[in-house]
Image (tube, helix red, strand yellow):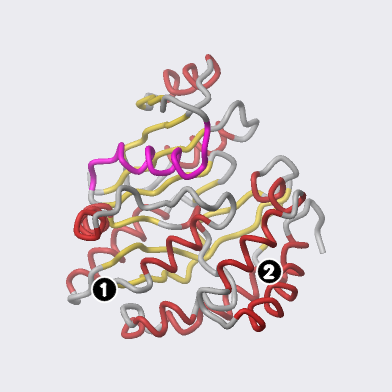
Amino acid sequence: MEHTFVICAYRESPYIEECIRSLKQQTCPSRLLLSTATPGRHLEELCERYGIAYYVREGKASISEDWNYALSLANTPYVTLAHQDDLYEPAYTETIVHAAEQACEEGRSPLFLFTDYWELLGTGKYANRRNLKIKKFLLNPLKRKQRQDRRFWKRHVLRFGNAISCPTVTYHKRYLDEILQREQRSALFAKHFRSNLDWQTWEWLSRKEGSFVYVPKLLMAHRIHEGSETSAVICDNRRRQEDYEMFCKFWPQWIAKCITGLYSESEKDNKVTIE
């Protein structure tokens, strides 16, 4: 197999079995693993029922350490960290692996690949909420393949906000491992951030050789609910502080402050209401 899904599980999500079923229904098979720092009988039973390898990370739960550990478990060229509340369309793996192989044949080196996505509220899937429209607009430049490996365009799609949704991302693990070893960096995700550790990672990778391969298709559904980590971070105002720090990587401080204020408005879409 060329691809692995590692399900990042935390405590007992009421949606995790739906996520597992969506991964088992892929048109192209992937290796399935589950990683957690909060083990329990519920997760063990799910893994036994669906034939999924079960791994427990020792130590306190931490998003960055959980993701780094989950990524380390995979031994295939491509790996997706599946968030426990989300759903993946049946063609996700097949489409991503094909796009990766095509990029390599064309002489490009994918750092990672990512897709468009639905927002899932209750049982409804929505593709045209305000936040998603903005992200698609920001990502438009990367629809042209010749721009996907250029530093300017990789940074351009990040300078006005995090337009790349982490659950849609598939990592080219072998290539990233080579970069980490060369840069003498121990892990892909840094511990500093709680909410923006993915955006920070994209920013770091935007300065490296390699492509951000954009597949503009709706291939997964990201669940919006009150118990999500994103909602929790927004409620305690940590998100705004991290947003400002990220914007400072692209802009002078006074501009970063202005953009942060505008960007915070987009967080209002991370609520369980349908506009």
* Magenta-highlighted residues: 61-76
Quadrant containing the C terminus in the rendered view: bottom right
Q: In the rendered structure, which amino acid carries the disc numbered 1?
A: Glu
Q: Residues within 10 Å of mark 1 (few under 14, many from 20)?
A: some
Q: Quadrant of residue 138?
A: bottom right
Q: Main secondary structure of the magenta part?
A: helix
Q: Secondary structure at mark 2?
A: helix
- Residue annotated with mark 2: 131
Q: In the rendered structure, which amino acid carries the disc numbered 2?
A: Asn
- Would residue 218 be found to the left or right of residue 153 on screen? right
Q: Residues within 10 Å of mark 2 (few under 14, many from 20)?
A: some
| 69 falls in the magenta region | yes
- Residue annotated with mark 1: 209
- Would residue 266 be found to the left or right of residue 51 on screen? right
Q: Quadrant of residue 101?
A: bottom left
Q: Position of residue 258 (x, y in %)?
A: 71, 80
Q: How many labels sit on residues? A: 2
Point 50% across, 78% down: residue: 157
Q: Position of residue 58 (x, y in %)?
A: 42, 24
**Nearer the observer, 225 or 92:** 225
**Nearer the observer, 33 or 256:** 256
The relative height of residue 48 versus residue 109 in the rendered view (above or below) is above
